[in-house]
Image (cartoon, rainbow, N blue to C red):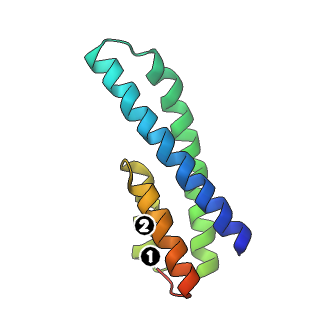
Amino acid sequence: MKGALTRFRVMAYVVGVFLLLLCVAMVFKYAADMGGAMKVVGPIHGFLYAVYLVIAVDLALKLRWSIKGTVLVLLAGTIPFVSFYAERKVVEKTAQGVPL
């Protein structure tokens, strides 16, 4: 279980950072007409988000999260900064032994 939690924590941070990079790339694309960064960061974020989903579902099954808690954690990777918050809450709840 500790390995699954560590994988989740790493992926939550990685996805959060790449989502912020994607937001910056979108600003460059639409404000400065420089879309090259989107062509690189977009697919990388998409792949990493898919990995995040698999790892989060694995952790949810191991810790027996509710459907609502699982869906909220899965959606956390789509809103800037929320994956960092979700990671912190998951770690707190897991340490307390409380399912999401």
Instruction: Say which residue label 2 marks.
Output: 71
Q: In which quarter of the image is the N terminus?
A: bottom right
> Is 94 placed above or below 37 here?
below
Q: Is residue 31 left or right of residue 63?
A: left
Q: Which amino acid does label 1 sit on?
A: Ile
> Is 2 placed above or below 21 here?
below
Q: Where is residue 12 in the image (x, y as percent from the top left)?
A: 54, 55
**Tag 1, which secondary structure?**
helix
Q: Residue at x 52, y 47 (%)?
A: 15
**What label sits on residue 67 in the rendered view?**
1
**Tag 2, which secondary structure?**
helix
Q: In this view, does 75 lie to the left or right of 99?
A: left
Residues at discs 2 and 1 in contact (Cβ within 8 Å): yes
Q: What residue type is labelled 2?
A: Val
Q: How far apart are marks 2 and 1 (CA)?
A: 6 Å
Looking at the image, the residue that sits furthest to the bottom is: 97
Q: Residue at x 58, y 44 (%)?
A: 48
Q: In which quarter of the image is residue 26?
A: top left
Q: Residue at x 45, y 34 (%)?
A: 21
Looking at the image, the residue that sits furthest to the top is: 33
Q: How crowded is mark 2: few (under 14 residues within 10 Å), some or many (20 or more)?
A: some
Residue situated in front as seen by the camera: 99 or 50 = 99
Q: Is residue 72 left or right of residue 93?
A: left
Q: In this view, does 25 lie to the left or right of 9?
A: left
Q: Where is residue 32 in the image (x, y as percent from the top left)?
A: 30, 13
> Is 37 placed above or below 15 here?
above
**What label sits on residue 34 in the rendered view?**
none
Q: Position of residue 90 (x, y in %)?
A: 51, 72
Q: Position of residue 40 (x, y in %)?
A: 53, 23
